[in-house]
């Protein structure tokens, strides 16, 4: 048996997903209307004029497959649905996970 220590692995799916697709999907899964809940802002407003964004995000999961011997079996939608459901369940017993309580902490 071989052991590996350290290193960085991309864990997930190697399907390209735009930030807009991700935001729309998350909104739909969480029961929100993406057209009403997404606000588009220029990246300069958030990061400043010197920021350069990555034009494409396509994870390379070759290392995950070779070293860990696993391949993705859960789609992005399935994973986001499970995550949203977990937060819903947990926020019932732990109100500190809700966005309203996070806003209070910022003040």
Image (cartoon, rainbow, N blue to C red):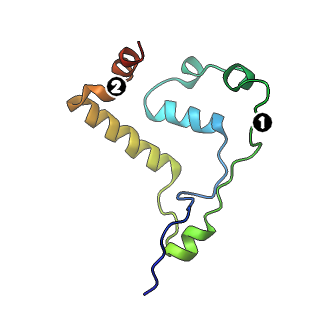
Q: Nearer the viewer, mark 2 or mark 1?
A: 1
Residue 55 shown left or right of residue 3 in the figure: right
Quadrant, the C terminus: top left
Quadrant, the N terminus: bottom left
Picture coordinates of residue 31 (x, y %)?
43, 28
77 or 97: which is nearer to us? 97
- CA gap between label 2 and label 1 equals 32 Å
What element does badge 2 sit on?
Answer: loop
Picture coordinates of residue 100 (x, y %)?
36, 18
The total number of labels drawn is 2
Q: Residue at x 68, y 53 (%)?
A: 58
Q: Residue at x 77, y 42 (%)?
A: 55
Picture coordinates of residue 56 (x, y %)?
74, 46
As drawn, the label of residue 52 is: 1
Quarter of image, res 10: bottom right
Residue 20 shown left or right of residue 1 in the figure: right
Residue 81 shown left or right of residue 47 in the figure: left
Picture coordinates of residue 69 (x, y %)?
50, 76
As drawn, the label of residue 98 is: 2
Q: Residue at x 40, y 17 (%)?
A: 103
Q: Residue at x 65, y 34 (%)?
A: 20
As drawn, the label of residue 85 is: none
What element does badge 1 sit on?
Answer: loop
């Amino acid at each position: 048996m071989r052991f590996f220590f350290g290193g960085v692995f991309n864990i997930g799916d190697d399907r390209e997903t735009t930030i807009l697709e991700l935001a729309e999907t998350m909104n739909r899964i969480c029961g929100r209307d993406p057209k009403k809940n997404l606000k588009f802002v220029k990246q300069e407003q958030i990061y400043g004029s010197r920021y350069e964004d990555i034009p494409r995000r396509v994870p390379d999961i070759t290392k995950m497959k070779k070293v860990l011997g696993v391949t993705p079996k859960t789609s992005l939608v399935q994973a986001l649905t499970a995550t949203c459901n977990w937060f819903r369940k947990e926020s019932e017993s732990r109100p500190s996970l809700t966005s309203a309580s996070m806003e209070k902490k910022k003040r």
